[in-house]
Image: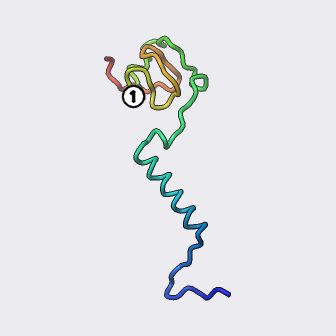
Amino acid sequence: MFSEPEHGSVRLSRRSLLRRAVGATGVLAATLNPALAQPKISKVAVNYQDHPDGDKRCDKCVQFQPPDACKVVDGPISPQGSCRIFVPGRPRS
């Protein structure tokens, strides 16, 4: 019914071609917009609180995105807030 591919060529079905195209589109979207690559974590999961924990403040964390967002935690956050995945490094504004 089907003949062997000549000279090492590979036959692709429409289904496998579509799967590859959809997969490549997802990779491209994640590359262009890193926020699509990783879902954010809930505030509950990271024990978020809207007040500092000692010197740990969101506005001092490398994940903080002014004025009230985080690269890792979902939803609006307070610059004075804190959570258990605090990573120091951002100078206080």
Q: Secondary structure at mark 1?
A: loop
Left or right of residue 71, residue 4 in this image = right
The residue under the point 57% across, 23% down is 43
Which residue position is annotated with label 1? 62
The residue under the point 53% across, 15% down is 49
The residue under the point 52% across, 21% down is 83
**Quarter placement of the C terminus:** top left
- Residue 64 placed where, x, y %? 41, 25
- Residue 71 placed where, x, y %? 45, 31
In the image, farthest residue toward the right:
1
The residue under the point 53% across, 23% down is 84
* Vertical position of residue 7 compared to residue 42: above or below: below
**Quarter placement of the N terminus:** bottom right
Q: Nearer the viewer, residue 52 or 54?
A: 52
Q: Residues within 10 Å of mark 1 (few under 14, many from 20)?
A: some
In the image, farthest residue toward the front:
14
Left or right of residue 1, residue 36 in this image = left
* Vertical position of residue 93 compared to residue 33: above or below: above
* Vertical position of residue 93 compared to residue 3: above or below: above
Dot 1 amino acid type = Val
- Residue 16 placed where, x, y %? 59, 67
| Image quadrant assignment for residue 45 | top right
